[in-house]
Amino acid sequence: MKTIVFDGRAFAGEKIEELKIISAGLKSRGIIPHLSSILIGDDEASRLYVSLKKKAAERIGAELDPYFLPEKVDLPTVITLIESLNMDENIHGIMVQLPVPGELGSHKEEIIGAINSGKDVDGLRQDSLFLHPTSKAVMSILHEAESRLSIKNIKSVCVVGATGMVGKPLVKELKNEGYKVLEANAKTENLKDLTGIADVVISATGVSGIIKPDMVKSGLIAIDVGSPHGDIDPAVEKKALFFTPVPGGVGPVTISCLLENLIEAC
């Protein structure tokens, strides 16, 4: 069987069209989905990501207000801003662009914890009402792979980066849905012993090319969450039945899942 190379942009585009219809329905009732994004510091990649989210939000008829704060802003100022957004009934979602730079980085949990759990569309709080958008994107892609391959009996899913920001909620969601999960990270000894037996390998370590072709079995589903470069060696595509490229795989779907959370928050 020929490898299915997942087109994340096309898949996300379909989601965006669905959300556009729902958003129009909300607008007819006087509700405009509204997201506030807080960016601390002047990281170029983070600014680009906020810009992409703003464009995507506008595509579905939602609004995104970016708040650009200097890197040396103090903690009380950040908390006060979040609390004011919590109280604003016209704001449905609040997110803080990560990583938080400088000294404020050590207060990340306190900053995230200040966001109302019902507005935490990034799913970062333990009690958030929403699944982290990247984890949600991976689950959507996995279900798409199962559907397109007509697979109903996945025996094991190996998550590499299982304790990270994406991996931790992803592992929980996979277990909730009844998958057997093999948990690993970039420093796991004999990583090949786990990845080599898994029907699905999901890697989210940020270590470029950590998953090599000799570490996986033929016929697997390979989902690459590596950023900015792929975790999974492109040569793995030849052994996979379903493969997500970087870029153009999980990334575009993540933004659509963030907007899906925003719509749910409304």
Image (cartoon, grey):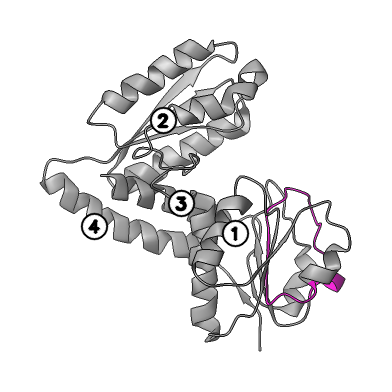
**Element type at marker 4?**
helix
Please give the residue where the numbered disc 3 appears in the rendered image: 131
Tell me where residue 122 appears, x and y as whole percent: 46, 42
Tag 2: amino acid: Ile
Q: Residue furthest left?
A: 29
Mark 1, residues whose alpha carbon is within 10 Å: few (<14), some, or many (≥20)?
many
Relative height, residue 98 to residue 214 (above, below): above
Tell me where residue 181 appears, x and y as whole percent: 65, 67
Return the mark for residue 171. Answer: 1
Q: Residue at x 49, y 35 (%)?
A: 50
Return the mark for residue 115. Answer: 2
Front residue of this view, candidates 48 and 113 = 113
Q: Is residue 64 left or right of residue 243?
A: left
Tell me where residue 212 appears, x and y as whole percent: 83, 65
Please give the residue where the numbered disc 4 appears in the rendered image: 21
Q: Quadrant of the N terminus?
A: bottom right
Q: Which-is-in-front pick, marks 4 and 1?
A: 1
Q: Circles 2 and 3: CB distance less than 8 Å?
A: no
Relative height, residue 18 to residue 116 (above, below): below
Q: Residue at x 46, y 12 (%)?
A: 77
Q: Residue at x 33, y 42 (%)?
A: 58
Q: Quadrant of the C terminus?
A: top left
Q: Is residue 199 magenta?
A: yes
| Image: magenta residue range | 196-216
Between discs 1 and 2, the one toward the N terminus? 2
